[in-house]
Image (cartoon, grey):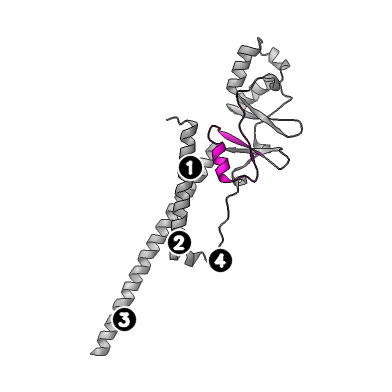
Amino acid sequence: TSVDGSGYLTLLKKFHSFIIICSYSVQRHPLYWKENTGRRSENMNILFFLTPKSDVAYISEDDTLRQALEKMEHHKHSAVPIVSRTGRYVGTLTEGDLLWGIKNQFNLDLKGAERIPVTAIRRRCDNRPVKADADMEDLIGKALNQNFVPVLDDQKCFIGIITRKDIIKYFYQKCETVKEQAKSCLDKGEKEHKKTDLSEVVKLRSQERALV
């Protein structure tokens, strides 16, 4: 079943809210504090999700239309980031941009595509980037209509991407972890309760013997 951008965002926000609520509930449990004394929670760093630039199939602003077509075909990507000579993020080139560009802007064959720079192709829209120190809310917001989010450093240089797939995968795994923690606390709570009941029985029987 296909899900549009708003559907993905709703799903991500629900995951996010669910994890916060469950984590809060689990961490308030006495057994959790007993076993995690001294541990300090840390804010999530978005770089945890980063696919570094060296592993990203991006294209240079100096590449030609043909090179862009071949790279996207080779990696089976429907959209790729464009990076300048100085490493800056220029924008995002999609299959649609290429198709409409070939149809409306250029009347050419594959040989002619070697003479057209990718920057000459009009782009419908660019994937909005985030800074490396952005928070999770900003990252999720950018993932609304993008299958990947470009990440920039303090100099606005492209350092990699974060895919929507990795975000969803993380939240799913986090949900499973929280569920396991909650189950563990409940199971241990029941055991502690049984131990308390048993100790009370032993205590009462001892008192009965003393009276006899």
Q: Is residue 162 above or below residue 19?
A: above
- Disc 1 residue type (three-letter): Lys
Q: Which quadrant of the figure contains the N terminus?
A: top left
Q: Is residue 87 left or right of residue 195?
A: right
**In the rendered image, which residue does mark 4 sit on?**
38
Across and down, in percent, residue 115 comes to 73, 16
- Write the start and end of the magenta stretch as one range: 125-151
Magenta-drawn stretch contains 139: yes
For marks 1 and 4, give the CA distance. Answer: 30 Å
Q: Earlier in the sequence, mark 2 or mark 1?
A: 1
Residue at 76%, 31% in the rendered image: 85
Please give the residue where the numbered disc 2 appears in the rendered image: 28
**Any mark on residue 13, and which?**
1
Give the label, 3 or 2, closer to the camera. 2
Q: Residues within 10 Å of mark 3 (few under 14, many from 20)?
A: few
Q: Quadrant of the C terminus?
A: bottom left
Q: Which residue is mark 3?
A: 203
Callout 2 secondary element: helix
Residue type for callout 2: Arg
| Residue name at image x 27 percent, y 82 percent | 205
